[in-house]
Amino acid sequence: MIHARALEKRYGDKPILRGVELDVGTHDFLLVTGPNGSGKTTLLRLCAGLAAPTRGELEISVERGRLGYVGHEPLVYRELTALENLELYGRLYRVPERRERIGMLLERFGLWDARHARAGSFSRGMLQRLALSRALLHEPELLILDEPYSGLDNEGAALLDRELAARTDDAAFVVATHDPQRIERFASARLSLA
Amino acid sequence: MAAAIALIFFYAPLDQDGLNQKIFYFHVPIAFTAYACFGWGGWKALRHLWKRDPNADLESYVAIHLGVIFGLLTLVTGSIWARYRWGHWWVWSEDQLVLFLVLFLFYCAYFMLRFSLPPGPQRANLSAVYALFGVALIPVSVLAIRLSQRFIHPVAFDKHGPQMAASQFFTFCVALVAMLALGATLYHLELAGKRLDLRLRELREALQ
Amino acid sequence: MTYFSDVAALARKDLLLELRARDTLPAMLLFVVSTLVVFHFVLPADSSDLAAAGLLWVALLFTALLGLSRSFAAEREQGVIDGLVLAPSDRSAIWVGKAVSILAFLVLAEVIALPAYALFFRPVGGALVAGVALADVGIAAVGTLLAAMATASRARELLLPLLFLPLAIPIVVGGVGASVADDPARYLGFLGLYDALFAIICWASFEYVVTE
């Protein structure tokens, strides 16, 4: 699904990534680790197609509609409600049976009661759950998650564990985290950015 | 080299005409060269977006940079010409001058855009798109200025550019070729200089 | 067909955002009326139709800039543009959706501005209204793309007017010409040409403005 060789990325003159190689196949779970500032976020953005490499080969053979991404920002509009945000993404991703899927995801992430509340009123943890719902809405084949546990309380983290466990057979994952113990059991491969 | 030869050619036939005409031999070729630079910049911008040519962004930038310099010279020589012809340093009735003013402003904004972004694919993309807008703006502005003259100066406006005798035409052509050659030389010089800068920076990076 | 539903979803989103935030449109309305009042003090009593029309167009242009500078604010402040770019829809749909919503704001602002102009200065003719309508399309099209560009840079509030004004000169020429000339059709035709040409360029190049 993703194939990269000698990947390099720099912003201006600052090199962020150098000589990165990776291969992610259809059922792989790649765990990306490294300290803060090691380029995990940049690498994930490259994998999602949000940035172009400065040099090297990067091949992403998944179409955009089959890719789910969770970054540092929840990528939701603060002035819209949770429901309206998911409605928008549901339309843009051509999700079949949109209403039902939105309802199901809201419920699974414990957001059903807050569905008519503006996203701007959400706590950090709720925003993260909304972001995860957004990413899972269209049943992606490839999930790119950048520190997906950040901001989640114990309950939220347990929900995420459940979702990951449910999907490892159906989808490929690229997950960046600076605390790998929680999801090591899912990982089929590891990439450490020093 | 090319520039030197061109300039020598330039000065020889210049003696035959009055001061007014002499400016003309600078002004119009400079204007042409500026158009050529903007056009070339636009072409390179298209190559960057369409064919992902890795060199095209720098080439487009250098071409437009030169175009702005020649554009500024066009405005200056045009202003001098206006002074001699009509007694004013600026005339709105001269379509060519107004056009260059608009284009000059546009391409200065190009530089503001470029300098407000860090180097990278985004800056290259945005510069290229804006450069293409510039190319589209040229004919549209020509039309707009001509249309605007109808309600700003509703009197018949005189044609710009004298009828040229054979010798004058020859001088003009030589001047044109010379100016284009000068432009091309400067382009390659600046491009080479910038490429050298990049190479130096890359080597420095590699050593770290 | 999905293209249109994408555009509809995006435009609907923008209109909904404005409805909730209620900051851009009221500012535009207040700005245009204030500007017209200022112009009353600027125009001498015996000034021509041309001068009055010119000032109207200046007011409209700067009101448009005010609206355009806010157009990508939500996307920029919350990084949401990534979410839109990741979607499988054509990136140009983002441009169409935004341009449609800006167009709506412009029209609403003019619904107030043109009667105000007629009240304060000169009566408003059909040709002027047609000119405003055509100019709005051009302003929305080009302005939206340039607003997206300006968003990317550090100096965004400064950059948008600089990028936009040279491109707005033909629009102003067309608009003023349509307002005062004897043969407005020529100027309206020119505005149509501008709109068609630049809309195509914007539509084709928006993809490159939001991706690397």
Image (spheres, coloured by chain):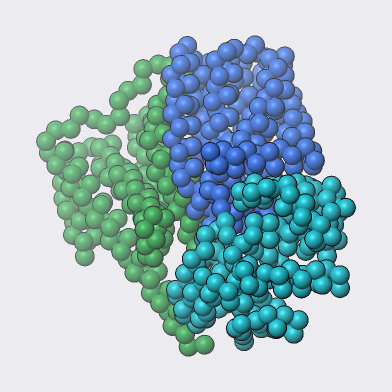
Q: Which chain is blue?
A: C
Residue B69 x, y percent position in the rendering: 40, 52
Whether residue B183 sits left or right of residue A132 in the image: it is left
- In this rendering, does residue B15 appear at all? no
Q: Which residue is drawn at 18% across and 59% down?
A: B5
Q: Which residue is drawn at 51% across and 51% down?
A: C207
Q: Which residue is drawn at 52% across and 59% down?
A: A63
Residue C46 x, y percent position in the rendering: 63, 13
Q: Which chain is cyan?
A: A
Identify the image quadrant of residue B1: bottom left
- In this rendering, does residue B175 appear at all? yes
Q: Colour of chain B?
A: green
In the image as oriented, which residue stretches furthest toward the left? B166
Q: Which of B18 and C59 is in front in this view?
A: C59
* Labels in figure, total: 0
Residue C208 x, y percent position in the rendering: 49, 53
Identify the image quadrant of residue B50: bottom left
Residue C131 x, y percent position in the rendering: 54, 21
Residue C173, compared with residue B117, is above or below; it is above
| Quarter of the image where the C terminus of chain A is located | bottom right
Whether residue C201 sits left or right of residue B3 in the image: it is right
Q: Residue at x 43, y 39 (%)?
A: B137
Q: Nearer the viewer, residue B23 or C155?
A: C155
Whether residue B114 sits left or right of residue C71 in the image: it is left
Residue A97, compared with residue C132, is above or below; it is below
Q: Nearer the viewer, residue B129 or C176?
A: B129
Residue A82, compared with residue C49, is above or below; it is below
Q: Nearer the viewer, residue C2 or B143?
A: C2
